[in-house]
Amino acid sequence: MAFCPSCGSQVDGRFCPKCGASVAADPGTGGTVPPPPAAQASGLSENMACALCYLLGLLTGVLFLVLAPYNQNRKIRFHAFQAIFMHVALIIAGFALSIVFGLLLQVPFIGAMIGLVVWPILGLACFALWLMLMYKAYNNEKWVLPIVGPLAEKQANA
């Protein structure tokens, strides 16, 4: 069975029915070209899949742990677990801080001012962390977060 050297689809004649490329017999392989690897056949490179693990946090982390070609890759599994653990930690921290800021609102003027200044700064810090994790993952850099990173490494290697 011959495969197209451009797109990897099966070819019966001299031209690919999918992309129209000419399929010439290669003397070294007997006229066949192996299909592309599973990661490229799915449409996502490894670094793009790692970056997309952080896109929606918990949702995309679980999605990449379930999808077949990605859940066998340890690097993608690490980023997926780190995205899940980071998102859960931010949800818990946000819940705890909302209780603290709710108590600060009981202080007449100072408490409200502290809450109005600190809450947006924490939101921007979480946004910057999210962007940095996606940037590092896309550039094939492994950036391990302090508490959730070692947990993600254990889960990815298990």
Image: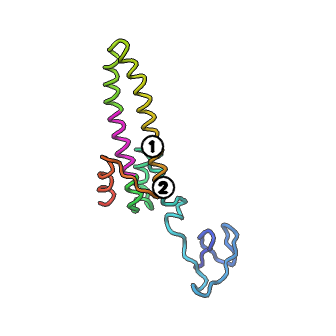
Q: Is 150 colored magenta in this rendering?
A: no
Q: Residue drawn 37% across and 55% down?
A: 78
Q: Secondary structure at mark 2?
A: helix
State the image coordinates of residue 137 (x, y, percent, origin top left): 46, 54
In the rendered structure, find residue 14 and report the number of the disc placed on it: none
19 in relation to 120, above or below: below
Which is more toward the observer, 16 or 137? 137
State the image coordinates of residue 151 (x, y, percent, origin top left): 29, 51
Quadrant in which residue 73 is drawn: bottom left
Q: Quadrant of the C terminus?
A: bottom left
Kindly identify the amino acid type of the residue bearing the numbered disc 2: Ala
Overall secondary structure of the magenta section: helix
Residue with the mark numbered 1: 130
Kindly identify the amino acid type of the residue bearing the numbered disc 1: Trp
State the image coordinates of residue 133 (x, y, percent, origin top left): 44, 48
Q: Is 83 colored magenta in this rendering?
A: yes
Q: Secondary structure at mark 1?
A: helix
State the image coordinates of residue 8 (x, y, percent, origin top left): 59, 70
Distance (Cα) linking label 1 and label 2: 15 Å
52 in relation to 101, above or below: below
Residue with the mark numbered 2: 49
Q: Which residues are magenta?
A: 80-93
From the viewer's perspective, tell me whether residue 45 is left or right of residue 11. left
Q: Quadrant of the N terminus?
A: bottom right
Which is more toward the observer, 155 or 136? 136
Nearest to N terminus: mark 1 or mark 2? 2
Which is more toward the observer, 94 or 146? 146
